[in-house]
Image (cartoon, rainbow, N blue to C red):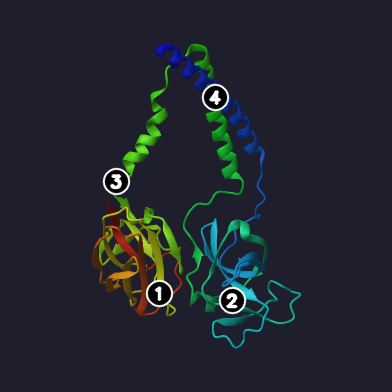
Amino acid sequence: MEDDIHANWVLVSGVVLFVAGVVGWFVGRSMQGRSPQRTPRYPQPGEVWWAAVPFRETAGEKVRPCLVLRGDGQTFEVLKITSQDKSQRHDHVPIPTQSWDRRATSPSYLDLSAPFRLSRGDFHNYAGPVDPGTWHRVVQVHPVGMAPMTTTPPGATARLAGRALTVLSSLAAVAGLVMVCAGATIVPWLGRSGSDSEAATGDDRPLSRIPIAASDVGSSGQQLDSTLNGRHFPVSTGFWVGCDGKAASATYQLDGKWHRLTATAGLDVTAPADVQAKLIIELDGKAALTDTVSRSRSVAVDLDLTSVRMLTVSAERTKGSCGTATRPYGALGDAVVHH
């Protein structure tokens, strides 16, 4: 009786696997033939694009020109441009429009306050380059540049996924036929993925692999190879330094799963030599560490994270001059969260 139940279970499993393999094969073939509608090229820093920019204080968005600051090929940070007269606002500057909108009869205004983060799908079409004078003012306020990472050409991801799905589906269909015809025993690796995932949850983890819930200035949280106060830290977590009177901050979502944070905090050798910054690390909104860091001064970080849900790292320039940067000034060397 037990053998019959086992044989029936294998037979049913084989039929399901075969059907899933056939369906997956057709889906994979369809994905390989698709060409997603995306912008013909990536926006670049210093370019003006028409894009769907969200409103800052209310829901919704508006297609308007915007100036691209930085990006990684998938997400970008931009400053919005408005045709309204903002000459009385200190956080707006006039921007000539003739280089990218020949129909304009008067200058527009560029909002220099906090950038907006857009995805590639939010961009509609390229308008033109920004004038050098305006760009020079922008780089004094905001970090600019493309992140040093490889991006996938439009449509390549879908085609690669389609090929992988086709191959896997073919294997699944063959395996299903074998199970139906021969009543084969269950392959041991079917449950391996789940067990490996559960075992991995008990490991310590670099801070750069913890999800960021919010980041207001710059793209903090990426893994860097840094040198802090003469010491090399190949696995560091970067953090931006606010240089315009406002701290740059990033909040990590811990959800009470971690016990301790260890790191060495400082400014990387790529930061200007005269810059000093005030570093604050908060645990659920309460300051747990406040100190000054520079290229010649690093500080040890050893914090109890028991029951902590949110960890915020913020830094603001207190001395020196900032310049154009394509990567964060600050880094948490060997930053690791422990169970």
Find residue 193 and report its image quarter: top left
Instruction: Label 1, secondary structure: give it.
Output: loop
Residue where numbered disc 4 is placed: 16
Residue 203 tag number: 3
Count neighbours of disc 2 (C-alpha within 10 A) and say few if under 14, some if 14 to 19, many if 20 or more: few
Are discs 3 and 2 less than 8 Å apart at CB? Answer: no
Res 198 visible: yes
Q: Tell me if I can see residue 184 in this picture.
A: no
Residue at image mark 1: 247
Label 4 vs 1, first from the N-terminus: 4
Inter-mark Cα distance, 4 to 1: 56 Å
In primary-sequence order, the first of circles 1 and 3 is: 3
Residues marked 4 and 1 touching at CB (< 8 Å): no
First in residue order: circle 1 vs circle 2: 2
Q: Is residue 108 left or right of residue 90?
A: right
What kind of residue is marked 3? Asp
**Residue corresponding to mark 2:** 132
Of 1 and 204, nearer the camera is 1
Tell us which disc is closer to us: 1 or 2: 1
Q: In the image, is 204 to the left or to the right of 110?
A: left
